[in-house]
Image (spheres, rainbow, N blue to C red):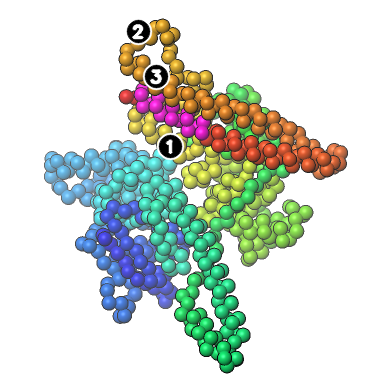
């Protein structure tokens, strides 16, 4: 055990911040401390750093804080004061134990600090600049570099990814994965925590609870624990009620008084199960279906050039109904411009950009959250959906974390994140079949983000969205559009899959564009999976070529079978979808008073087709997943053979 806190309590200003906590660090563990703002996360870091002490407890015989040996601790703070007149090189070399400029240790140290310095996005020449010449965010990065070079036994990092762009955060993730010391993180970057930590401690109401695994594992386990605790609590409460009823029934009867006393003793000795606190996140369990199904192809862009007076880039794209596409890329490359072109706020410079049939759109941009109203949230929402009962309105708002007093707040006093959440709740409740979202979770806390992630996962319509929150992209997107320079690349799988392949290609210094098209190549008829030459020319090939050709063909056979099954199910699903689309539109128009009254038979046909369509869709999803696995297996084989 490198470091341990046992039954530690910390009070400040007469208020208990940490109450009887247990905490430990083993070896090279990477640990995250999570909890709401104000829960005491920074207090715990300061305790580990030695800046605070645990409250004195004369009844506790053993020490509250212990370590296996004398450990060094380094802590990164968001606001650091350093010698502004020194150059970066002077500051970084202060941590070098060897002062001889020509020693091997000094050379190794300088190589390491050059690697870290450039890894954080600085040019080598900038180490000659004085610290005062850097911005506050850059100075925080330099402080982190100094800490990494010192290599303390325990490194404490408070929001280390603040002020870092995504490439630098990705570099830091890889560096932390290889870092051979213990690290304790406090961070709101959930994707970062997923990549680097193997233990999570949650701080809530002064109590600390340990979870094994990364952030996602912690969230999954917490939800399971809450379900189990709720059932146990309800079961115990039912038993207590039964026992109390028996006591009341028999306590005044002489022959049963002893029995009543024994039941009372049983209650007194029973260890109480605490009532679980409801998770701050609402998880949508059902599907959020659009009001109208909409056409099979939601968006078609052909040789589309986007921009203002001058084209930023050109792209061709077809978006299928039900896709959830995350758009990533550096600032200024055209992501928001593309969304504005899709919704019609900007005309194309040239080319075609058309929405499909029966598309009802919801659009959220950075100005959408600038709503103003003197009404309460519940009144504002009810005015938008007058057909809802007040109970339904409150239930809907509660699902988006506007509960109790929050629902009674005036819209004008809501924070930017709360207003954005309210607008998105309105949008999802109106049930469009296409959502176009530009940074929908900006300024939201983690609980709000995870609630909306759950809503977007439950939503069965189509989503095009721009976000810099990598965890949000991972949770929602099933395909990625990468805006890079003046080109756009489409990747047909999720964000984690994209990153994995991107890193593989970067490590092998290959062309990532070729990799992105690997799935498309695997989908055409037996690409690279049969011999290039006729069989009668087989003798002209080397043994290695024939063996390689045989391996490709074997790998392609199950891929082809899986593809054929997908095509059959796809055709069946498309036929049903087309019929369902027409009936859906007919019903919708009738409800708007623009068509004939719906007959019971049409409604029954629609309901029956909906069930059929859902079943075929389930089979199609499974077949598609199987095909995807076969295609990627073939792709892995192809890449491995080409590289080796």
Q: Is residue 553 left or right of residue 576?
A: left
- Say if 594 sits above or below 311 in the image: below
Element carrying mark 3: helix
Residue 505 colored in magenta in the image:
no
Q: Residue at x 38, y 35 (%)?
A: 503
Which of 503 and 1 lies nearest the eye of the viewer?
A: 1
- Say if 428 sits above or below 526 in the image: below
Give the dominant element type of the magenta stretch: helix, strand or loop: helix
Query: Does the image show residue 3?
Result: yes
For disc 2, the marked residue is 540
Q: Give residue 251's position: percent from left, percent from top.
A: 58, 89
Q: Give residue 345's position: percent from left, percent from top.
A: 66, 35
* Mark toward the viewer: 3 or 2: 3
Which of 526 and 642 lies nearest the eye of the viewer?
A: 526
- The answer to whether the residue labelled 1 contacts the one labelled 2, judged by CB atoms less than 8 Å apart, is no
Q: Earlier in the sequence, mark 1 or mark 2?
A: 1
Q: Quadrant of residue 299?
A: top right
Q: Residue at x 70, y 58 (%)?
A: 393
For disc 3, the marked residue is 550
* Mark toward the viewer: 1 or 2: 2
Q: Earlier in the sequence, mark 1 or mark 3?
A: 1
Element carrying mark 2: helix
For disc 1, the marked residue is 499
Q: Residue at x 57, y 49 (%)?
A: 454
């Amino acid at each position: 055990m490198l470091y341990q806190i046992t039954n530690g309590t910390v009070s400040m200003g007469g208020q208990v911040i940490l109450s009887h906590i247990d905490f430990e660090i083993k070896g090279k563990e990477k640990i995250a401390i999570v909890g709401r703002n104000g829960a005491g996360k920074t207090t715990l870091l300061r305790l580990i750093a030695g800046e605070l002490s645990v409250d004195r407890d004369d009844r506790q015989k053993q020490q509250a804080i212990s370590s296996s040996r004398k450990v060094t601790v380094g802590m990164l703070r968001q606001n650091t004061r350093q010698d502004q007149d020194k150059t970066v090189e002077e500051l970084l070399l202060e941590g070098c134990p060897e002062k001889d400029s020509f020693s091997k240790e000094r050379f190794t140290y300088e190589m390491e600090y050059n690697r870290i310095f450039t890894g954080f996005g600085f040019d080598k020449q900038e180490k000659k600049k004085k610290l005062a010449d850097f911005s506050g965010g850059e100075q925080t990065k330099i402080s982190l570099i100094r800490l990494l070079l010192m290599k303390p036994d325990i490194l404490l990092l408070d929001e280390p990814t603040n002020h870092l762009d995504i490439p630098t955060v990705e570099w830091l993730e890889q560096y932390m994965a290889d870092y051979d010391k213990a690290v304790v993180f406090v961070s709101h970057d959930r994707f970062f925590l997923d990549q680097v930590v193997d233990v999570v401690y949650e701080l809530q109401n002064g109590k600390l609870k340990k979870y094994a695994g990364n952030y996602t594992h912690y969230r999954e386990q917490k939800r399971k624990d809450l379900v189990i605790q709720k059932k146990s609590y309800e079961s115990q409460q039912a038993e207590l009620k039964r026992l109390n009823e028996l006591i009341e029934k028999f306590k005044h009867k002489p022959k049963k008084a002893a029995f009543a006393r024994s039941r009372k003793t049983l209650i007194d000795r029973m260890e109480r199960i605490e009532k679980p606190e409801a998770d701050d996140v609402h998880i949508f369990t059902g599907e959020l279906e659009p009001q109208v199904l909409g056409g099979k192809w939601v968006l078609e862009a052909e040789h589309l050039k986007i921009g203002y007076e001058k084209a930023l880039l050109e792209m061709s794209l077809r978006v299928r109904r039900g896709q959830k596409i995350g758009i990533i890329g550096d600032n200024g490359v055209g992501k928001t411009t593309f969304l504005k072109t899709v919704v019609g706020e900007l005309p194309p410079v040239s080319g075609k950009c058309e929405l499909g049939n029966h598309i009802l759109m919801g659009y959220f941009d950075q100005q959408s959250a600038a709503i103003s109203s003197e009404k309460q949230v519940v009144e504002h929402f009810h005015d938008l959906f007058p057909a809802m009962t007040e109970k339904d309105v409150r239930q809907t708002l509660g699902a988006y974390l506007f509960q109790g007093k929050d629902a009674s707040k005036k819209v004008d006093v809501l924070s930017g994140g709360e207003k954005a959440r309210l607008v998105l709740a309105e949008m999802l409740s109106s049930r469009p079949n296409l959502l176009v979202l530009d940074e929908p979770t900006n300024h939201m806390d983690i609980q709000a983000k995870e609630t909306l992630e759950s809503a977007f996962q439950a939503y069965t319509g189509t989503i095009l969205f721009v976000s810099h929150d990598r965890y949000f992209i991972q949770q929602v997107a099933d395909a990625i559009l990468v805006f890079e320079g003046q080109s756009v690349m489409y990747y047909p799988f999720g964000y984690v899959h994209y990153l994995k392949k991107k890193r593989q290609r970067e490590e092998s210094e290959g062309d990532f564009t070729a990799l992105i098209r690997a799935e498309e190549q695997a989908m055409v008829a037996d690409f690279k999976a049969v011999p290039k030459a006729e069989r009668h020319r087989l003798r002209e090939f080397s043994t290695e070529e024939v063996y390689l050709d045989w391996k490709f063909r074997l790998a392609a056979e199950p891929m082809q079978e899986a593809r054929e099954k997908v095509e059959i199910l796809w055709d069946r699903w498309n036929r049903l979808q087309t019929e369902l689309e027409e009936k859906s539109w007919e019903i919708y128009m009738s409800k708007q008073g623009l068509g004939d009254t719906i007959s019971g038979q049409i409604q029954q046909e629609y309901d029956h087709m909906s069930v059929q369509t859902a079943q075929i869709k389930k089979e199609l999803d499974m077949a598609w997943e199987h095909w995807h696995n076969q295609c990627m297996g073939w792709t892995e084989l192809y890449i491995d053979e080409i590289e080796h």
